[in-house]
Image: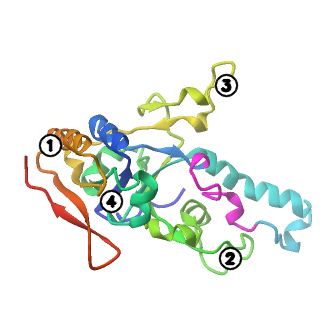
């Protein structure tokens, strides 16, 4: 799709409710969801690129609408072929804490340099691991014209990494898998996704590539996490990686922000 690029950030964060955090640590994996199943209906949508302005010189044999359909086809399919693990560059976003757990969950810090060796694989000289893309936040009116390339834009990258400015607080970095195979990477689907004949659409399958214990390097506990649940989370975290730094988020009385307080080893 595009050339493998330098790692964007060595440390990325995953916001989860308490149960989701426990599952992630116990299973030691990352969760990838199909791009067409994300919570933003505009995510990775082919309409982010303008295919409508077909130049006259391209219409000598085929009509403009057919050329538009042919050129846009690969970008329509790209959304169905891509699975995404959404991470963040920050651990203290008020909106992220509220949206994902009402401040009662966790935020897990992943060392991406260590995780990459588990996610990367090369076959016949071709890199087949998880790509890393930083999300760019724009207004949809800025969508590029496919047929009139002013800049040397990578349209695949643009489609998979562009979101509305309303989501800018997420500071998202995406890990991408293309055409993952159910036999090669651990996967599952929800019973509610089953059709009447028992089959499941490929896009409804979620993939969980495993990573090592050492990749889990930081853990932040929400302000409102219950004492009993906190004790359970701490027990699992210490089992997972005794070297993990664990923090409790607290309210900063001098500003509308959260402060992490380092917890002593138990």
Report x, y in % for residue 26.
27, 35
* Image-based side of 22 in relation to 32, left or right: left
- Earlier sequence position, callout 3 versus callout 4: 4
Tell me the mark number nearer the camera, choosing from 2 and 1.
1
Residue 149, labelled with which disc? 2
Report the Cα–Cα distance between label 3 and label 4: 36 Å
Q: Nearer the viewer, residue 118 or 174?
A: 174
- Earlier sequence position, callout 3 versus callout 2: 2
- Earlier sequence position, callout 2 versus callout 4: 4
- Earlier sequence position, callout 2 versus callout 1: 2
* SS at badge 4: strand
* SS at badge 3: loop
Instruction: Report the residue at 68% width, 76% height from top.
Output: 149
Please tell me whether the stretch drawn in magenta is mainly helix, strand or loop.
loop
Q: Does residue 261 sit above or below 202 in this rendering?
A: below
Residue holding disc 4:
12
Report the Cα–Cα distance between label 2 and label 4: 33 Å
Tell me the mark number nearer the camera, choosing from 3 and 2.
3
- Earlier sequence position, callout 3 versus callout 1: 3
How many neighbours does mark 3 have within 10 angstroms: few (below 14), some (14-19), or many (20 or more)?
few
Report x, y in % for residue 39.
57, 52
How many neighbours does mark 1 have within 10 angstroms: few (below 14), some (14-19), or many (20 or more)?
some
- Earlier sequence position, callout 1 versus callout 4: 4
Residue 195, labelled with which disc? 3
Q: Does residue 256 sit above or below 4 in this rendering?
A: below
Magenta residues (range): 36-50
Report the Cα–Cα distance between label 3 and label 1: 41 Å
Residue holding disc 1:
238
């Amino acid at each position: 799709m595009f050339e493998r690029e330098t790692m964007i950030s060595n440390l990325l964060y995953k916001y989860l409710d308490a149960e989701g955090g426990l599952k992630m640590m116990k299973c030691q994996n990352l969760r990838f969801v199909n791009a067409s199943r994300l919570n933003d209906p505009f995510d990775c949508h082919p309409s982010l690129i303008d295919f409508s302005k077909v130049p006259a010189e391209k219409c000598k044999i085929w009509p403009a609408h057919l050329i538009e359909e042919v050129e846009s086809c690969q970008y329509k399919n790209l959304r169905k072929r891509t699975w995404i693990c959404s991470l963040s560059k920050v651990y203290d976003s008020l909106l992220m804490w509220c949206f994902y757990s009402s401040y009662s969950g966790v935020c897990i810090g992943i060392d991406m340099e260590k995780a990459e060796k588990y996610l990367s694989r090369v076959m016949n000289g071709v890199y087949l691991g998880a790509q890393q893309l930083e999300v760019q936040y724009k207004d949809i009116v800025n969508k590029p014209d496919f047929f009139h390339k002013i800049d040397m834009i990578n349209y695949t990258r643009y489609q998979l990494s562009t979101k509305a400015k309303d989501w800018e607080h997420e500071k998202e970095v995406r890990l991408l898998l293309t055409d993952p195979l159910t036999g090669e990477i651990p996967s599952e689907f929800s019973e509610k996704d089953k059709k009447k004949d028992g089959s499941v659409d490929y896009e409804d399958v979620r993939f969980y590539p495993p990573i090592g214990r050492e990749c889990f390097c930081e853990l932040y506990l929400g302000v409102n996490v219950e004492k009993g649940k906190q004790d359970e989370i701490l027990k699992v975290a210490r089992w997972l990686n005794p070297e993990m730094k664990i923090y409790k988020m607290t309210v900063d009385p001098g500003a509308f922000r959260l402060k992490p307080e380092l917890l002593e080893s138990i």
